[in-house]
């Protein structure tokens, strides 16, 4: 039986890439019965019914999967955040980073629309970028208008599956159009009333960019920590995780415990106060979550 990778899912059909050819497939009823949904990024075994159509018979083991966007086997998440329009949000970025870290996906922070910034904006964005670089993250500052930073992004895409994710209106589709001008992906202006963009991407699809596969995804409307326990959160903040090794008590949640090295690091400026505040906010959110049954 032929094998391939799902590169697009649309209206009940799955488009499987196999030996440089794309086959339109449906999922067998057994998937619905077992409550398993094929996802973009899945490695599958399929049966060919005719020259272009077939049925997916088996789904390979996944190394990870995301719910929003629905995609599997992601190597890297490119978190696209605009410097302005909409304004840069460390709270939203940290929420994305936690979910990406929890799913063992390498994050790359890409800050767009730098051409629209004032001198004060640029100073603030550069300060934040330095904080995230100090925490161990790769950060690129880009503009699709001036093409600054665009070529720096290309080497990060080679030979892996990357997902472009971020708030609506930050320029994900514009960034992909800059990387591959022939795509002509639809973009949309920011709503002056809402301060965010309209959803211009309606489905998940893997696109060949710079010898890698990149997923353009619908914008996110909500991000919840449904599967993350309080004890897991520490590992999703790299600088907090490293400093936690110096805490007096094992299993320290860096909240009310005495002789906490993380709290000391915040007080002396080693860890940015806003990162620690977001950790605290997320920890409380997880503690307040209704129990799962």
Image (cartoon, helix red, strand yellow):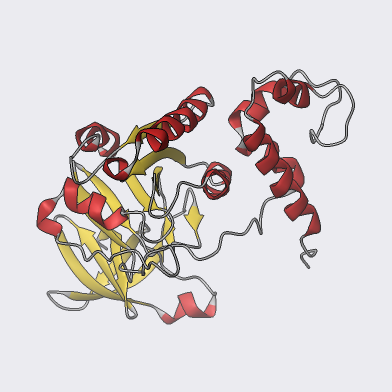
Direction from residue 47 to residue 227 in the image, left or right = right
Q: Is residue 115 above or below residue 292?
A: above
The residue sitting at the left extreme is 182
Q: Quadrant of the N terminus?
A: bottom left
Image position, residue 103 (x, y; %)? 54, 47
Q: Nearer the viewer, residue 241 or 34?
A: 241
Residue at x-position 77% and y-position 21%: 264
Residue at x-position 64% and y-position 25%: 271
Q: Is residue 40 above or below residue 180?
A: below
Total labels drawn: 0
Image position, residue 25 (x, y; %)? 27, 74
Q: Is residue 50 above or below residue 17?
A: below
Q: Quadrant of the C terminus?
A: bottom right
Residue at x-position 81% and y-position 32%: 251
Residue at x-position 44% and y-position 57%: 167
Q: Is residue 248 visible?
A: yes
Image position, residue 24 (x, y; %)? 22, 73
Q: Nearer the viewer, residue 245 or 118?
A: 118
Image position, residue 139 (x, y; %)? 39, 32
């Amino acid at each position: 039986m032929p094998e391939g990778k799902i590169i697009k899912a649309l209206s009940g059909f799955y488009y499987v890439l196999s030996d440089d050819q794309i086959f339109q497939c449906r999922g067998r009823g057994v998937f619905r019965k077992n409550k398993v949904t094929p996802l973009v990024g899945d490695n599958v075994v399929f049966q060919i019914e005719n020259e272009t159509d077939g049925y997916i018979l088996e789904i390979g083991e996944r190394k990870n999967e995301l719910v929003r966007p629905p995609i599997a086997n992601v190597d890297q998440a490119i978190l696209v955040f605009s410097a302005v329009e909409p304004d840069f949000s460390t709270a939203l970025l940290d929420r994305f980073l936690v979910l990406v870290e929890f799913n063992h996906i390498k994050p790359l922070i890409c800050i767009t629309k730098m051409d629209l910034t004032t001198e004060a904006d640029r100073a603030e964005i550069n300060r934040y970028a330095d904080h995230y670089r100090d925490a161990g993250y790769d950060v690129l500052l880009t503009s699709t208008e001036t093409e600054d930073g665009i070529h720096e992004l290309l080497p990060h895409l080679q030979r892996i599956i990357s997902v472009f994710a971020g708030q609506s209106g930050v320029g994900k589709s514009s960034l992909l159009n800059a990387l591959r001008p022939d795509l002509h992906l639809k973009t949309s202006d920011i709503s002056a009333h809402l301060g965010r963009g309209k959803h211009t991407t309606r489905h998940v699809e893997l696109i060949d960019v710079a010898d890698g596969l990149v997923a353009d995804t619908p914008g996110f409307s909500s991000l919840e920590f449904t599967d993350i326990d309080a004890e897991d959160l520490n590992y999703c903040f790299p600088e907090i995780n490293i400093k936690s090794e110096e805490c007096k008590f094992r299993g320290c949640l860096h909240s009310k415990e005495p002789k906490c090295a993380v709290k000391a690091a915040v007080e002396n400026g080693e860890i940015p106060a806003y990162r620690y505040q977001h950790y605290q906010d997320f920890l409380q959110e997880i503690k307040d979550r209704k129990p799962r049954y």
